[in-house]
């Protein structure tokens, strides 16, 4: 017996199926997939990605990423950005169609992150809406303004004799354990009331050394305006290589918003070594000291991004303090000479001064700021103008005085004055001195007020000058 209700139900069902079939449009998505041919220390050779671009991000199994670095005819060399112990020949590799980027914005302030933007502190996952590529073209010449505003470090010998301007690139170099990181950290601590955002980039450092720096920043309340980007010594060389570029992109975001930013690269020696390791593993030809020929270019394109923008572009600035380690005081080695030629001056720390307890161990004769007094307050120029010359004369005469030669009264006065200059410019770590206090001290120094004070009492005399100028005792 024919059931009209059943027929109606079947017709409606078939009608729905017909409509769904007609509405369906098959979507085909092309996906370019390659395979790992072999894995070495920090790199992988990949075949089967003919259209991959230079420095494009590629994805491996286990959420591991890499950067296409060496584009060959039959395969590509990929720099790995994470633990690759699980990777093996035959694993699938996917193109992502984008370059390496990093999270930026105010959410990164106060955080400790790795170059991939992953949080390394205990404050939870980093949630940032905006991301920027780690490799970006530097601002054009016409977008830049002259460096004329000082960046006060709070370190007397630097602010007086080797001034740094906002937008400048000032190299800090010296042998191991001479206080290079201390100068950079003290400069960050002094920005607490200067409206300067700070980025501290630890490149291939020991985890204990980074933890010590972060603890110092937290103890002095500097983490509120600081981001710490960390690649540890046991990280793959690819992470060490991208760390300073990631830190610079974070800084550039603030600069383009009109902020003044300070970036510390600690240190570019490890960066150059990581790049040398990657290059040699990728079978690129070695050059001087086994570094590849383009090691100058990787540092110059990094430091060229430091600048001060014109008011029409927000007027922000990016000041770079790269750190380099010398060996046996050899400033003429390959990497130090490269960076001296790229930067706008250098602060050289002498191991001899460090051993004598003269801290900070800045060798005034070998240190220079090529921006000079243009980035120095006018009051400094008045009181510190003749100081560097007097100090240089003292250092030259001091060498002769060691031989026990007879000295005339004028020479003895120069030596006594120079000894007082050296004593006044000494400073404890993590104790930045305010601008007005520095100028008061330098004024008294340049007028010879300390020349009759015994050297043993110079510290007390300095505190009396601060007290007379209305400042609390400084450590």
Image (cartoon, helix red, strand yellow):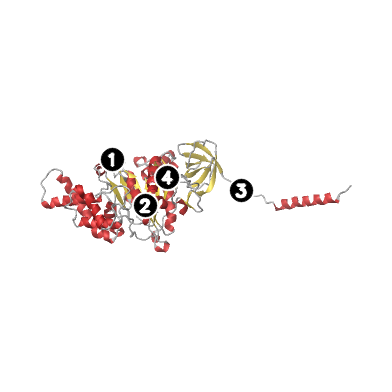
Residue 328: mark in rendering: 1
Marks 1 and 4, the one that precedes in the sequence: 4
Question: What residue is disc 2 on?
Answer: 320
Instruction: Please provide percent x and percent y for residue 369.
Output: 29, 54
Local packing at callout 4 (Cα closer than 10 Å; few below 14, some 14-19, many 20+) is many
- 176 displayed left or right of 6: left
Where disc 4 sits, the SS reads: strand
CB within 8 Å, label 1 to label 4 = no
* Tag in front: 2 or 3: 2
- With 348 as the anchor, is 89 left or right in this view? right
Marks 4, 2: nearer the viewer? 4
- Ranked by sequence position, the earlier of labels 4 and 2 is 4
What crowding class fits label 2: few (fewer than 14 Cα within 10 Å), some (14-19), or many (20 or more)? many
> What label sits on residue 160 in the rendered view?
none
Mark 2 or mark 1: name the one nearer the start of the chain.
2
- Picture coordinates of residue 84, whole percent (x, y): 49, 38
Q: CA distance from mark 3 to mark 1?
A: 59 Å
Left or right relative to 402: residue 293? right
Cα separation, mark 1 vs mark 4, equals 27 Å
| Residue 29's disc number | 3
| Alpha carbon distance from label 4 to label 2 | 17 Å
Marks 2 and 4: in contact by CB < 8 Å?
Answer: no
Mark positioned earlier in the residue sequence (3 or 1): 3
Mark-to-mark CA distance, 2 and 3? 45 Å
- Residue at 48% of width from left, 49% of height from top? 101
Residue at the right extreme, as displayed:
1
* Residue 294 x/y as whole percent: 39, 46
The percent coordinates of residue 157 (x first, y second) are 27, 52
Q: Circle 3 sits in a helix, a strand or a loop, which is it?
A: loop
The residue at which mark 4 appears reads as 230
Does residue 94 show up? Answer: yes
Please say if the residues under marks 3 and 4 sit with CB atoms less than 8 Å apart.
no
């Amino acid at each position: 017996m024919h059931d009209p209700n059943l027929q109606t139900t079947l017709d409606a069902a078939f009608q729905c199926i017909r409509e769904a079939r007609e509405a369906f449009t098959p979507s085909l998505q092309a996906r370019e997939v390659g395979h790992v041919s072999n894995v070495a220390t920090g790199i992988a050779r990949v075949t089967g990605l003919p259209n991959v671009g230079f420095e494009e991000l590629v994805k491996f199994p286990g959420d591991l990423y890499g950067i296409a670095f060496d584009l060959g005819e039959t395969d590509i060399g990929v720099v790995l950005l994470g633990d690759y112990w699980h990777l093996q020949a035959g694993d699938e590799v996917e193109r992502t169609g984008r370059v390496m980027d990093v999270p930026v914005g105010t959410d990164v302030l106060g955080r400790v992150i790795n170059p991939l933007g992953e949080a390394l502190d205990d404050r939870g996952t980093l949630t940032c809406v905006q991301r920027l590529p780690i490799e970006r073209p530097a601002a054009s010449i016409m977008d830049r303004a002259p460096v004329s505003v000082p960046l006060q470090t709070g370190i007397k010998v630097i602010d007086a004799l080797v001034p740094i301007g906002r937008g400048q690139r000032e190299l800090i170099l010296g042998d191991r354990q001479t206080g290079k990181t201390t100068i950079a950290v003290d400069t960050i601590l002094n920005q607490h009331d200067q409206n300067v955002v700070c980025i501290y980039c630890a490149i291939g450092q020991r985890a204990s050394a980074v933890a010590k720096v972060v603890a110092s920043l937290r103890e002095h309340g500097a983490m509120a305006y600081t981001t710490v980007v960390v690649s540890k010594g046991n990280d793959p060389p690819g992470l060490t290589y991208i760390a300073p570029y990631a830190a610079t992109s974070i800084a550039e975001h603030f600069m383009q918003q009109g902020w003044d930013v300070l970036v510390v690269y600690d240190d570019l020696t490890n960066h150059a070594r990581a790049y040398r390791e990657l290059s040699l593993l990728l079978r690129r030809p070695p050059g001087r000291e086994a570094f590849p020929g383009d090691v100058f270019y990787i540092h110059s394109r990094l430091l060229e991004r430091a600048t001060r923008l014109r008011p029409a572009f927000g007027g922000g600035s990016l000041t770079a303090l790269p750190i380099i380690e010398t060996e046996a005081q050899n400033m003429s080695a390959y990497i130090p000479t490269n960076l001296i030629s790229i930067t706008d001056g250098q602060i050289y720390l002498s191991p001899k001064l460090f051993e004598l307890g003269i801290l900070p161990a800045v060798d005034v004769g070998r240190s220079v700021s090529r921006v000079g007094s243009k980035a120095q307050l006018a009051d400094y120029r008045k009181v510190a103008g003749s100081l560097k010359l007097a100090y240089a004369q003292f250092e030259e005469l001091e060498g002769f005085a060691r031989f026990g030669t007879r000295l005339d009264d004028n020479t003895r006065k120069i030596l006594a004055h120079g000894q007082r200059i050296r004593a006044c410019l000494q400073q404890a770590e993590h104790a930045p001195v305010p601008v007005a206090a520095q100028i008061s001290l330098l004024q008294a120094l340049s007028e010879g007020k300390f020349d009759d004070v015994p050297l043993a009492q110079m510290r007390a005399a300095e505190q009396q000058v601060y007290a007379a100028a209305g400042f609390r005792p400084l450590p």
